[in-house]
Image (tube, rainbow, N blue to C red):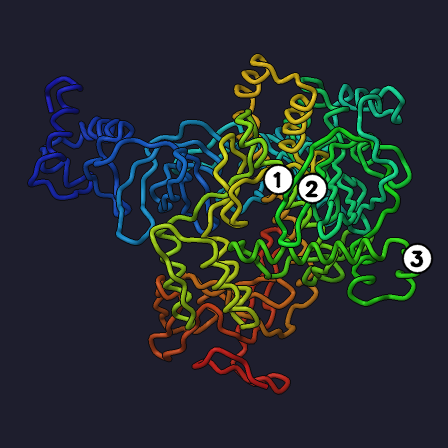
Amino acid sequence: MRKGFTERKKLVYDFICDVSYIPMKFKEIAVLLQVPKDRRRELHDILDLLEEEGKVSLTAKGKYIKGSHSILRGTYQGNPKGFGFVLPDEEGQADIFIAGENNKGAMDGDQVEYMITCSPEGKRKEGYISRIVSRGVVQVVGLFEKNQSFGFVRPDNQKMLQDIYIPEGKWMGAVTGQKVVAELTSYGEKDKKPEGRIIEIIGFANAPGTDILSIVKDYGLPVEFPVRVCNQAERVGKDVSAADIMGRMDLRNLDMVTIDGEDAKDLDDAVSLVRDGENYVLGVHIADVANYVQEGSALDKEALRRGTSVYLVDRVIPMLPPKLSNGICSLNAHEDRLALSCIMTVNPKGEVINHALAETVIQVNKRMTYTAVAKILEEQDAQEMADNQERLPMFEDMRALSLILRERRRNRGSIHFDFPETKMVLDEDGVPVEIKAYEVNTATCLIEDFMLLANETVAEEYYWRELPFLYRSHEIPDEEKMKKLSFLVHNFGFHMRVNEEIHPMEIQKLLNKIAGTPQEAMISRLTLRSMRQARYTTENAGHFGLAAKYYTHFTSPIRRYPDLQIHRIIKENIRGRLNQERIAHYAKRLPEVALQSSTMERRAEEAERETIKLKKAEYMKGHIGDVFVGVISGVTRWGIYVELPNTIEGMVHVTNLTDDFYEYDEVRFELVGEATGKVFRLGQQVMISVLEVDTHRRTIDFELMEERYDGLSCIWEGSEING
């Protein structure tokens, strides 16, 4: 080791690359290379450098091996258990498992360089992070706790595994028990915590509203609109004038309604339906937001920055200021509104035989709710039918067309997931008083059917026009994930055929088979997780889940930026202004819009899920000790997840199951007690009691009940509970 550093580095690398080399720890390498103890720091530096360059890597057991793969890039996604995954930058690649000791101190959201260290057949690849390229977390939201000479913040984000050290004087007056925002000044090292300073105090953890606001801050969701944006909204949000109407198709005499939830304020779609012989003429009329939000304006830049409206359990964070979203852009009844209409002639087979896109002026005749329409069509409610006597034939025709469209989609293989979404009822302080499955009725279905048809129709037209456009793409699932799903459902007695290219019809057949079984919700969710996530693209890749060749998002420009973007393209095309310069402009702009919109959509979904998890935990805190019957929805090495009929999910930890050692079968998804022989598998019905709830961590712990309780007996050897 007396040569120059470069030569010593080559010597070490050649040693590890030698065919006779077997993986060794640092001390073993030092001994074999006869490195004196006072020079071993240099050997450490050489190995670290080789590791950063991807020439060697360190195994989970601390042994050095040759780096057999090139350095790749991706985003690190942490897990509360200490391990994590890298989401590769390269599209279509599966996530890479990263053991806790191989993450090099990466935090959730960091951009990293990594290497593949293990590629077991039929299983997830494993890797090692060689370098952190950039940090994804700059601020952390959490609970502040003060000591005599220092403080620390316990992050709300459970993927952040370490508390943040706050030096004295960096507290901003915060006291123990308050939720705060901390700015990171150091990301820590191997034996040193990350360090930061308090930059905002949200409020005491138990104060009404603090819980949701903490999640809003944690995800960086913009709440207030900049003054310039609000001023611009005030200027453009004027009533419809004669000049606005000029040149538009006037549909104010056409009978049309909006159908939404009772509490909806941003009404961006209206529907009309008339008969033309045996055909249906369906009008889907969408608020012409592009008329008010000009490209490049302050309003437009803010809308793109937000990407989407965010629907949390107790509030909506809109993409556009309320002056627009709840005002001039909302299709309020009996008021003139500007719209972009898709008018489709549909034959009795559900085929669109003719359609037109037009800039229109409309006036909604009546605002209807899902509940009211369902009462008319499902219950024949006398009062609702009397109140809407003149529109009863239209609603009946809407139901008939909806059934035709749904059957047509079903025949081509469209996938319909029937597991329940969560419906929460909160009191005036934001405390959950009821949690139940969200009810789907005839009215929600028919509006969904009409919007889907409009989206497909618009997408197909602009695909064949070969103009720059934004599509909503849902690619074919990963073959390995589908094979794993097929094997899993086979264990429950169901069959799913998996070829090289799976058809959505096969998945729908599976969902039909499991309908009404105790395993339905669990298998449905596993199936959904096995598919790719839909995203926005500039190329039309079709929509696998809908079995649609062409699909876009056209119907919600108030709350989704991609819809607003394609409205501009459609309007310019209608007006004959899409010259080569404008085509080139959109070709350059749309990739950025697609990426930003997809990213902001994922952020919104994660924030929405966290608020639901939080309120579920708060709700179950009032049910400690209560007993419920649920279905095992997940099986892991550390325990089992159980889902209750009201969609609440909790965990039974292995330590709470028994003192016996449990063997985990990750192929069959089951835990087996070595001494007792008890088996816990996906889809099995079990009786649990609520053991513990942590609202800070948003976790619910259950305990299995083996004894009889109120006449119910748990049959461990089987998979059901008998009364």
Cβ–Cβ under 8 Å for marks 1 and 2: yes
The location of residue 175, given as percent across then percent down, is 68, 40
In the displayed structure image, the side of residue 103 where residue 435 appears, left or right: right
- The residues bearing labels 3 and 1 have C-alpha atoms spaced at a distance of 34 Å
The location of residue 72, given as percent across then percent down, is 33, 32
Q: Which quarter of the rendering shows the C terminus?
A: bottom right
Chain-order first, disc 1 or disc 2: 2
Query: Given the image, on which type of amino acid does mark 3 rest?
Result: Asp
| Mark 2 nearby-residue class (10 Å; few <14, some 14–19, many ≥20) | many
| Mark 1 nearby-residue class (10 Å; few <14, some 14–19, many ≥20) | many
- The residue at the point 40 percent across, 78 percent down is 678
Label annotation for residue 344: 2
Element at badge 1?
helix
Of 645 and 575, nearer the camera is 575
Which picture quadrant has residue 101?
A: top left
Residue position for label 1 = 457
| Mark 3 nearby-residue class (10 Å; few <14, some 14–19, many ≥20) | few
Query: Given the image, on which type of amino acid does mark 1 rest?
Result: Thr
Residue position for label 3 = 387
In the displayed structure image, the side of residue 381 where residue 44 appears, left or right: left
Say whether residue 119 is visible.
Answer: yes
In the displayed structure image, the side of residue 306 where residue 540 appears, left or right: left
- The residues bearing labels 3 and 2 have C-alpha atoms spaced at a distance of 28 Å
Q: Residue furthest left?
A: 20
In the displayed structure image, the side of residue 446 where residue 380 appears, left or right: right
The nearer-to-camera label among 1 and 2 is 2
The location of residue 110, given as percent across then percent down, is 46, 33
Chain-order first, disc 3 or disc 2: 2
